[in-house]
Amino acid sequence: MMAKVTDAEMAWPGLAGRIEGAAHILPIRVYHEDTDFTGLVYHANYLKFCERGRSDFVRLSGISQTELFDAGGDKEPAAFVVRHMDVDFLKPARMDDVLEIVTSVDEIGGAAMTLLQDVTREGTVLARLRVRIMLVSRSGKVRRLGDLVRASLERFVNQEG
Amino acid sequence: MMAKVTDAEMAWPGLAGRIEGAAHILPIRVYHEDTDFTGLVYHANYLKFCERGRSDFVRLSGISQTELFDAGGDKEPAAFVVRHMDVDFLKPARMDDVLEIVTSVDEIGGAAMTLLQDVTREGTVLARLRVRIMLVSRSGKVRRLGDLVRASLERFVNQEG
Amino acid sequence: MMAKVTDAEMAWPGLAGRIEGAAHILPIRVYHEDTDFTGLVYHANYLKFCERGRSDFVRLSGISQTELFDAGGDKEPAAFVVRHMDVDFLKPARMDDVLEIVTSVDEIGGAAMTLLQDVTREGTVLARLRVRIMLVSRSGKVRRLGDLVRASLERFVNQEG
Amino acid sequence: MMAKVTDAEMAWPGLAGRIEGAAHILPIRVYHEDTDFTGLVYHANYLKFCERGRSDFVRLSGISQTELFDAGGDKEPAAFVVRHMDVDFLKPARMDDVLEIVTSVDEIGGAAMTLLQDVTREGTVLARLRVRIMLVSRSGKVRRLGDLVRASLERFVNQEG
């Protein structure tokens, strides 16, 4: 279940972001596709940015989402699924901005975890998400997170939270 | 500020959905673009569906978002902006599903309103959003909603809420 | 392999568009998500509109894409895949526009078909696509289109082409 | 019209890709949002990837798209607009793939330029685009590319083409 790292990834260490203390940080550029006619980033796209942050956070923690499809001892595919999300949209992002998605873990339980994610620009928080995630099999059954996932993520639990 | 209705719209009355009591209902088809590799609708796309619902709810209420750019007596463009959002993802939608986005108004204040939106499939709620919206000018100043907007939307305030 | 039609679809006959002669026509509204900061529809979104047109064209022809996953007598899933695309972007679409996607068949061969698709607004062509499509199994093998697919689509072959 | 480089960009030199000879190369990760239910990258998203490549190619050439809104001596905003696109979809990309978008210039004329773009994975071409671009003012008038744009891009004209 450990993620393989390709040559292209080694050559571009920043592509999956970086770990700083108990947080994962992913830089993201705002492109045409992210904006709408108001000139600002379309609100649902902050969720896309944060999902990229979560994917790379999980990747750098050593978990492969594509291989999670076989995790847990049985063969039924499983994927992380968002169950609840609370979002504050504080300030707008714009075309060409460089943002940083800051992800930390608020809580890990037996079957769910809660992540805190800030979309920031030069240290200012533009949007703040609180995301509750579960591991769900293709047939819709909730899976326990498993020792491997828990061990990989526990060191990111926010001590201040 | 009243929205113009084109011939194409008259010929396709369903394109902007329908009003039923105090709710607006917009049918939406799930296409390839809405799904991801897990086989389910990608979580951020429920927000797109609900924004379509809000746009058509506002349209059928007689408000033109493109003309709102000149609303309020001065010339600075304004747009509805999402400030807060709370989302429960309850059950997944899949390719080819026909969904209905049910929008009602929970509360209208002087400068903000809160909408309730359900993403449903054959009467079952798949996702539930509570969305706080403000009218913001291009320079970022919060605008009062104005009598015209309030008069257009007040009859949709959910009496049960 | 025939598509099921739900009650919601019967109540909204326009949701999958309509057949006119040898063409399929799907009305589409331009929403926030479709535009970018230039105020116009983002170029890649014309391809999304056309894919919706193709999906509903195939649907009204009586073919279910989700069931195509089991077509042809064996069990390996298959899906229509775009192999080549030629696009002219002629005029821009804008927020709130009502567009019509006009789809016709230029040619059906043993394993591929070529569709012509116009994105129009009140009769004016805004973008024109020529799309070559093949039926490909999950393992990447090209499938023959099959008698059922061919019989369903042959009456849409453009006679003027 | 020169693009400003922020501290965050300096710290992440890879974010806007790199120049190699006459080509610009942008590494891109495939995330959930890029795939569809077939398990592969949705076809229109290759166009998004290539637009990101073009944006960063233009950025590293020293041209700011946001400032182009004021380029050419007058004040009417202008933006690069795609007029024609020819796409070969050769092999599929999948979740978690690291892709490289390779952009070079085929031809620069007075008012239009043609770019060649390959979407590659570990040296294999997955999709190939030929894109004709013009600089168009907000009112729809074609602008001449201007000496500044031409001087910035001419060294990227593909010598082998």
Image: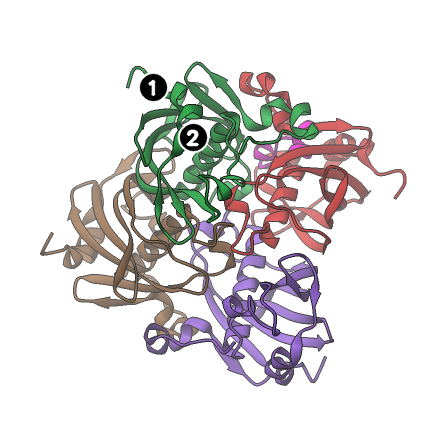
Chain colours: A brown, B green, C red, D purple
Label drawn at residue A114: none
Return the x and y of residue B12 as percentages of the image width and height.
65, 25
Of D1 and D37, nearer the camera is D1
Residue at image mark 2: B149
Q: Where the C terminus of chain D falls, by quadrant?
A: bottom right
Q: Residue at x 39, y 74 (%)?
A: A12
Q: Check residue B115 for magenta coloring.
A: no
As displayed, is residue D58 above or below residue A147? Answer: below
Residue at image mark 1: B158
Q: Select label 1 or label 2 by which is in front.
A: 2
For marks 1 and 2 on the same chain, the one whose residue lies earlier in the sequence? 2
As displayed, is residue A83 above or below residue D148? Answer: above
Which corner quadrant of the image does residue C9 belong to?
Answer: top right
Which segment is the magenta one?
C56-69
Left or right for B156, reference D54: left
**Circle 1 — which element?**
loop
From where the camera sits, is residue D37 visible? no
Which residue is the extreme one toward the left?
Answer: A160
Return the x and y of residue A138 as percentages of the image width and height.
38, 37
To which chain does the residue with label 1 belong?
A: B
To which chain does the residue with label 2 belong?
A: B
Give the amino acid type for the residue marked by disc 2 in the picture: Val
Which residue is the extreme one toward the right?
Answer: C160
**Circle 2 — which element?**
helix
- Mark 1–mark 2 distance (CA, rounded to whole Å): 16 Å
Give the amino acid type for the residue marked by disc 1 in the picture: Asn
